[in-house]
Image (tube, grey):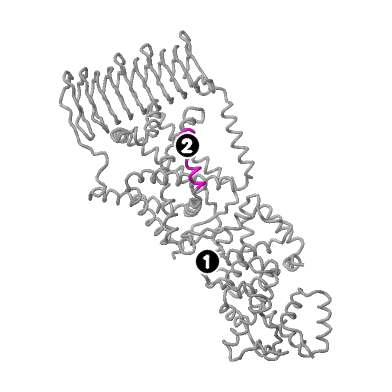
Amino acid sequence: MEQQKRSEGMSAAELQVLADCIARARSGSLEAWGDLYRDFAGPIFRFCRRTMPTREDAEDATTEIFMKLREKIGMYDQSRPFQAWLYKVAANHCWDLLRRRRTRQDLETEGVDEMPLEHPDPSALDKLLEDRSSQDMRTALARLPSRARMALVLRYYSDMSYDEIADTLGVRRNFVGVVLLRARHQLREALGERGSMGAAAGRTQ
Amino acid sequence: MSHYDEMTFLQYLEGNLERARSLELSAHTQHCDACRALLGVLQRETHLLTHALREQDEAVPARLFNPVRERISWAWVLSFGMAAAGIYWFVTTYDQLSTGLTEAGIGKTDLMSTLFFNGVTMKGWSSMWTAAQWLAVVSLGVIGFMLVRKSMRRWNTIALVMSALVAALGMPLGAAAADIKHSEASYTLKAGETVKTDLIVFGNSIQIDGTVEGDLIVFGQNVTVNGHVMGDALVCASMLTVTANGTVDGSVRYAGGNFILSGKVGRSMLVGTGTLTANPGSEVAWGVTFGAGNVFLNGRIGRDILGGGGHINLNGYVGGNIRLHGDAPVDIGSSTEVLGKIEVKGPKPPEIASGAKLASAPVFTLVKRDTDTFSSFSWWHKLLAWGASFVFGLVLVLLVPAFFDDTVRTANRFGVSLGVGLLLLAGIPLAALLACITIVGLSVGVPTIFLYLLLIYGGKVFVAAWLGRMLMGKDGFAGVMIGIGGQRVIKTPAILGHLAVGLAILYALRMIPYIGGWITFAVVVWGLGAVGVTVFKRLSSRSAPVTAPAPVTA
């Protein structure tokens, strides 16, 4: 299913071209590397732009990620989707950079049980989201703590599975849902602070 | 009516809910307005979020897409260019250099260079020019090869090179106009036998009782010349003995542990050895140049002596001038007769026995073994040395930033770098020697030696940059970053800062008594290894993409 999702938008022929290109890159073809770079530098740069604090950080991280890819291409399992592997390497690198900058929050010890089971007021949430542009969303995202932002990017930009997210962030698989939900709450708070809306989450039953 | 919680909705939307529970929730939303509304708004939120994240709102920076260029060729072109320049420089300044090296005490610094420089000129200037021309051809060939290399697969390339090598080695030996004896434990050219060409021998114990009409080139353990060599003798062995019956009509070039001369040498001697003994009755028609630990010159030397060493004892005839640089007092014995001038540099004046016949009193210059570390001259000298190293590093950063950065990264792996460095330290001179005496030729051997010396000198800049980066680097941030596809971000001020600080620390460490020398040695080995590993990685991993300089100052 993941493979289908990640490969959507690519025809069988395009997938074959990509597979050939990867094989040539593995055997050392510079041209193939150039092709891969041209195809994926943009997505990887945007990934970094979403996860790293500044544009310059994102540019630097992009170059470093491709250096890593070059070293690790031999380890790529061709039965898996290339993009998934690509994002995994990118995510690990960015997360590592953030960790080294000590901007990561250490919330791993918090358990699922501590997340209150809520049924937010749909109309309040609807109102909060009303007329929100993509730019508003991105501005709010940028204000989130690193881990919340990283979790949302891994899930909704890179389309990673919960297992992959758990592996990247170093949390238990069961905890990924909590991380994502909490990230959404934080995003709503950020949106609310920015706009005139109050907290969206109303507690019910 | 109870409602589903937000987490359950999220799991449902993400497809993580079990099938039974999904169906249950789906049925529930059919008749629960609140839950249906929440599901709808969560879906909308997901959509907004995904769209916001995936929207291509800003262009990818242009510098990530600079033109792709092959970068390894730079390193090679530069290497060969430097080697060619070195040859040219050497040819034009040979005389001063030779004197300078000798006066500096070649035995203690770079014997290899002297050996080779002189070895090259055994055949005269013409072969130097031939070598330079060959080098130019080889450089052009390498550049051409680099250009077509892209379309060649690595294994094809290796196969081609290996085939060429095998073909070259398999060529008829007559092409080299030499008789080559390989891998023989013991070789004897019997008395009465004659080799009409050059004789090249590899072996443990080598005895020349017969006649060699060309040059004698020997690599071995114990070498004894008891016969007649009509050309030059180039010997690399732990022990060389030229017996009273032995004669070399040309010059003798020797590198090894112990050299005993009892016979005659028709021209000059150039010797780098632990002990050099010229017995009474021995004769060298021209001059003697040496770098040696213990020297006993008791025979007859027709012209000048130039040398440096530990203990130097003179007790024979010298037809020309003597210039010596000794660590201990030079002993001039009672049987000494010198027709020319004597200049001695060292810690103490020469000790002259009564009975020695000297044309003039020796001129002595006091040279302390270690100059005062803290004198102003010494500081000035060190500052100059630091500056020269910095400029060397600067040139490398500007010319081959990607290679520089790769090497600094490699230096981060101490173990590999030091191990490979030791291997190269011993291996390169050996390979160069082999290249010089085999069919591969001087055109490969001599540039190799130039590169080797350059690396011995220059390896420290990589270690210094690494050191600076370790101390100053933020988040392990690299001053130069290379990406695939050609982009490069050169934080020039950052890397130059690393280099400057690293070099300053290295030069400071070198001043520490006793361990300073070891630190210098370790840095040389480390740098050499880092370069070696990087070059090897680049040659073996053709996946190395590309970069074009696109300096963006930080």
Given the image, on which type of amino acid does mark 2 rest? Ile
Quadrant in the picture for residue A77 = bottom right
Give the left or right position of residue B167, taking residue B229 as reference: right
Instruction: Name which residue type carries label 1.
Output: Arg
Return the x and y of residue B83 as percentages of the image width and height.
43, 40
Residue ID at (80%, 89%):
B32
Q: Relative to the observer, which residue lies in front, B378 or B438?
A: B378
Q: Please, is residue B551 above or below residue B452 in the view?
A: below
Left or right: B371 with respect to B43? left
In terms of depth relative to the viewer, which is nearer, B165 or B84?
Answer: B165
- Between tags 2 and 1, which lies in front? 1
Which quadrant is home to the N terminus of chain B?
bottom right
Q: Residue at x 25, y 30 (%)?
A: B324
Circles 2 and 1 on the same subunit = no
- Which numbered marker is on residue B428? 2
Distance (Cα) linking label 2 and label 1: 41 Å
Percent x, y of residue B493: 41, 62
Q: Note whether B130 is above or below B260 in the view shown.
A: below
Position of the C terminus of chain B by quadrant: bottom left
Would you place residue B185 above or below residue B308 in this image? above
- Magenta range is B415-431
Asked if residue A85 lies in the magenta stretch, the reply is: no
